[in-house]
């Protein structure tokens, strides 16, 4: 494990803990109190109920440092491509919103010029999200293709022609009375 995932010596000690009795299945060890999941860049407290479930934490219980902040700051938004990260299950939808929020803060602070490009969204995706389409649904649309018809009245929609909006996470034509 690389040193840069640790915020303090105590965190390193707890993450690297190995029990001789449970070394082949550490999740069975009652003394295991902290886990790090590299695939999703998450720290957590194992639940110890026979599953691999854990309670994700955002602050170190020993030094108090924010854990997610370190991870988010290392991401290159435009290069990471937010929706592809969601599609590939590299981040959760909650993490995607955290990344989006941080990009918006950086924009407000003058650190970045274009939130849309930083997040890797095209004009249609950015507009749909601005009309309240969830990032999870937007990722599904990127993966599977955008709907071709209004979800409410069934009229054909070519989303490239901009004659649409979003309602309840669904594509809706502007002619629809609903």
Image: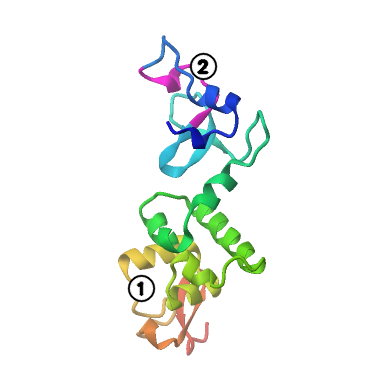
Residue 21: name its quadrant. Answer: top left
**Circles 1, 2 touching at the beta carbon (< 8 Å):** no
Q: Residues within 10 Å of mark 1 (few under 14, many from 20)?
A: some
Q: Which residue sits at x=50%, y=69%? A: 133
**Residue 30, numbered label:** 2
| Labels 1 and 2: the sequence-earlier one | 2
Q: Which residue sits at x=57%, y=62%? A: 103
Q: Would residue 121 appear left or right of 88 to someone viewing this image?
A: right
For the record, the magenta segment spans: 24-35
Q: Residues within 10 Å of mark 2 (few under 14, many from 20)?
A: few
Task: State which quarter of the image contains the N terminus.
Answer: top left
* Above or below 42: residue 89: below
Q: Would residue 152 appear left or right of 62 to someone viewing this image?
A: left
Q: How is the image coloured?
A: rainbow
**Residue 70, numbered label:** none
- Residue 55 position, x and y percent, is 55, 35
**Residue 146, numbered label:** 1
Q: Secondary structure at mark 2?
A: loop
Q: Secondary structure at mark 1?
A: loop
Q: CA distance from mark 1 to mark 2?
A: 47 Å
- Residue 15 position, x and y percent, is 50, 26
For the stretch drawn in magenta, the main secondary structure is loop
- Residue 66 position, x and y percent, is 63, 42
Say if the magenta span includes residue 32. Answer: yes
Closer to the camera in the image, 100 or 16 = 16
* Above or below 130: residue 137: above
* Above or below 31: residue 57: below
Q: Which residue sits at x=33%, y=64%? A: 143
Q: Which residue sits at x=67%, y=66%? A: 109
Residue 125: name its quadrant. Answer: bottom left
* Above or below 14: residue 148: below
Say if the magenta span includes residue 72. Answer: no
């Amino acid at each position: 494990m690389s040193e840069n995932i640790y915020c303090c010596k105590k965190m390193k000690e707890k993450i690297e803990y190995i029990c001789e009795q449970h070394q082949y299945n550490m999740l069975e060890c009652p003394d295991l109190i902290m886990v790090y999941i590299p695939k999703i860049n998450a720290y957590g407290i194992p639940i110890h109920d026979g599953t691999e479930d854990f309670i994700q934490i955002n602050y170190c219980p020993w030094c108090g440092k924010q854990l997610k902040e370190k991870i988010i700051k290392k991401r290159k938004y435009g290069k990471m491509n937010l929706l592809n990260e969601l599609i590939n299950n590299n981040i959760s939808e909650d993490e995607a919103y955290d990344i989006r929020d941080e990009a918006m803060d950086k924009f407000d602070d003058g650190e970045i010029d274009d939130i849309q490009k930083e997040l890797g969204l095209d004009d249609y995706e950015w507009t749909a999200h601005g009309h309240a389409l969830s990032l999870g649904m937007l990722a599904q649309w990127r993966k599977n293709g955008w709907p071709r018809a209004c979800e409410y009245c069934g009229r054909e929609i070519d989303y490239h022609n901009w004659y649409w909006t979003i309602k309840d996470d669904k594509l809706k034509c502007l002619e629809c009375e609903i």
